[in-house]
Amino acid sequence: MEVITTGCIVAPTGFKAGATYCGIKTAKDSFDLGIIFSEFPATGAALFTTNQIYAAPVKLSRKIIQKGRVRAFVINSGNANACTGEQGYKDAEAMGQIAAKCLKTPEDEILVASTGIIGRPLPMDKIFTGIKTAAATLGNTPEHGNTMARAIMTTDTKQKDIAVRLKINNKDVTIGGITKGAGMIAPNLATMLCFLTTDVSMPASLLNECLRNSAESSFNRITIDGHMSTNDTIAIIANGASGVNIPSKNNDLRIFQQGLDYVTSYLAKAIVMDGEGATKFIQIDVVGAWSRSDATKIARSIADSPLVKTAMNGEDPNWGRIVSAAGYAGVELDESKTNLYINDILIFAKGMPTQCDLNVLSTSMKGRDIKIRLELGLGDFKDTIWTCDLSHEYVTINAEYHT
């Protein structure tokens, strides 16, 4: 498998992207609107926020994706178009309509997405100008892909993109992806936008299954602040331009799924690493549970604990916060069978603290990566959650992020 790190969203054959600054954001040197377009008819699949308060573009795109045919994504950043009532829905429709005219594509094959501040109407005059400009500048160079990745950013500090090239039936198949997200990150899906492209061909139902499987092992395994968004969207277009068709579940699909999983896992971890104010990337492994559901609940309980996250920020091996967070997860535990490791150093064993060298442990926590492993000693199931620390900078960013 070959990893591609530039122009990723247009790395698959037959895709173009265009991005522009149209005035939604205040920073004039940024990008705030973009289009991803397949030159060929394509199938599509998408997943959306499970929040019962959800944005107008989510409502519209949920309707469109039911047909399983997608040619383009049109996305703006800086304004979420959420909690904007009937007018917000009309504005989302208008984004699709103007994009359809510019791309000469049916409007029911265009997914619309927005991200940014909640509760403000879209500046549609700027949006219309931006869509026309983005459509007129479509291209498939690395620069087109890179600017598209930047166009969906809000509080992100860096673009997040990746692509992989695989061999299926001796033909090259490419999967590309971009994502954004740094705050309001909570399962399921986390708070994010993610757009994926691939040049294989497959039925929409099978593509949807692949996307769900991949999201479950990646985006549904991250959390930053426990706050779910109104706009979460993960969507993929498959246009068949590689000449590879995967009509059903077979070994070709297994290879494709592995590639897709690599892309989504990379992007999910990139979100955590770029968490607002984050200084640590934390992997939480819970093993030896009665069920995977139990392992997940405990791992999430630890990951979402502000006290655990601040301890990690302070590079303090305060194991009491970790085991107590496990204890209130709503899962039956046996303290006498529980072991806790931080960075592979056993700190709590069979319900008692160990005599480990805390200075050595604290030194190991000064690095970027921290690994927490909780062994329950009850069963054969496990799960992993990725999160980050909670810093002074996180509070500053969100205190100053005004409506």
Image (cartoon, helix red, strand yellow):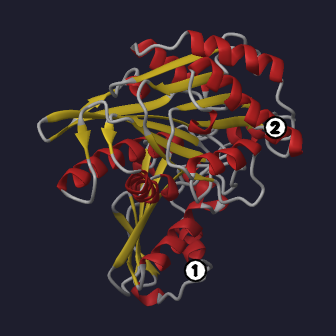
> Can you say whether 311 is above or below 367 in the image?
below
Query: In the rendering, which numbered label is found on residue 55?
Result: none
| Quadrant location, the N terminus | top left
Mark 1, Cα crowd under 10 Å, few <14 / some 14-19 / many 20+, is some
Kind of residue at disc 2: Lys
SS for callout 1: helix
Mark 2, Cα crowd under 10 Å, few <14 / some 14-19 / many 20+, is some
Residue at 20% across, 50% down: 252
Compared across the picture, whether 258 is left or right of 403 comes to left
Can residue 160 be seen here? The reply is yes
Kind of residue at disc 1: Gly
Q: Work out which residue is located at the far left of the displayed protein and give it.
A: 170
Residue at 11% across, 36% down: 170
Residue at 77% across, 15% down: 23
- Number of numbered discs present? 2
* Residue 11 pos. (x, y %): 35, 25
Residue at 33% across, 61% down: 344
Can residue 279 be seen here? The reply is no
- Residue underneath mark 1: 327
| Quadrant location, the C terminus | top right
Compared across the picture, whether 281 is left or right of 199 comes to right
- Residue underneath mark 2: 90
Compared across the picture, whether 249 is left or right of 7 comes to left
Front position among marks 2 and 1: 2
| Res 228 quadrant in image | bottom right
Q: Quick one: 237 or 156, which is closer to the camera?
A: 237
* Residue 250 pos. (x, y %): 21, 58
CA gap, disc 2 and disc 1: 47 Å
Mark with earlier residue (2, 1): 2
